[in-house]
Amino acid sequence: MKKIVVAKFKVKETKADTFENLAQPLIEKSNMEEGCLEYQMYKNNSESDEYLFYEEYKNQEAIDYHKSSPYFESFVRDIAELLSDEISIKILNE
């Protein structure tokens, strides 16, 4: 069953560029994963410190693979100090 993940990040005002630079390699590598159907990042036009990640996966196993990848683990670790709020994550079944 296809899975959709929507993750919302709130970044400290002065850390947006750093966040975007760290996100780019994650997006590129994630889109190359066999089980990943789509992996995109969007910046909120009205809230410049807010980002939305939209991710589609073939199944739960593909999400598990992604979450255990070294580039995902590195991204999560590296952005911790850049965030101004907790990450909001929703997983939907399709």
Image (tube, grey):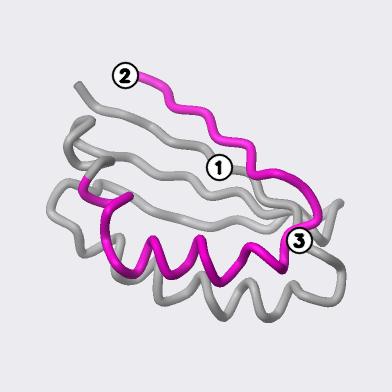
Q: Which residue is mark 1?
A: 7
Q: What amino acid is labelled 1 in the image?
A: Ala
Q: Secondary structure at mark 3?
A: loop
Q: Is residue 45 on the magenta stretch?
A: no
User: Could you tell me residue 5's position as x and y percent?
Assistant: 43, 36
Q: Residue at x 86, y 52 (%)?
A: 46
On the image, which quarter does residue 48 sit in?
A: bottom right
Cβ atoms at labels 1 and 3 below 8 Å apart: no
Q: Quadrant of the C terminus?
A: top left
- Mark 2 vs mark 1: which is more N-terminal? 1
Q: CA distance from mark 1 to mark 3?
A: 13 Å
- The residue tagged 3 is 11
Magenta extent: 65-94
Q: Position of residue 71 (x, y in %)?
A: 34, 69
Please tell me whether residue 63 is drawn above or below residue 71 in the rendered image.
above
Q: What SS does tag 1 mark?
A: strand
* Side (left or right) of 66 relative to 7: left
User: Disc 2 designates what residue?
Assistant: 94
The residue shown at (24%, 49%) is: 36
Give the SS element for disc 2: loop
Q: Residues within 10 Å of mark 3 (few under 14, many from 20)?
A: many
Q: Give coordinates of residue 54: x percent, y percent.
A: 48, 45
Left or right: where 31 falls relative to 73: left
Image position of 35 (left or right of 15): left
Eye-nearest disc, 2 or 1 = 1
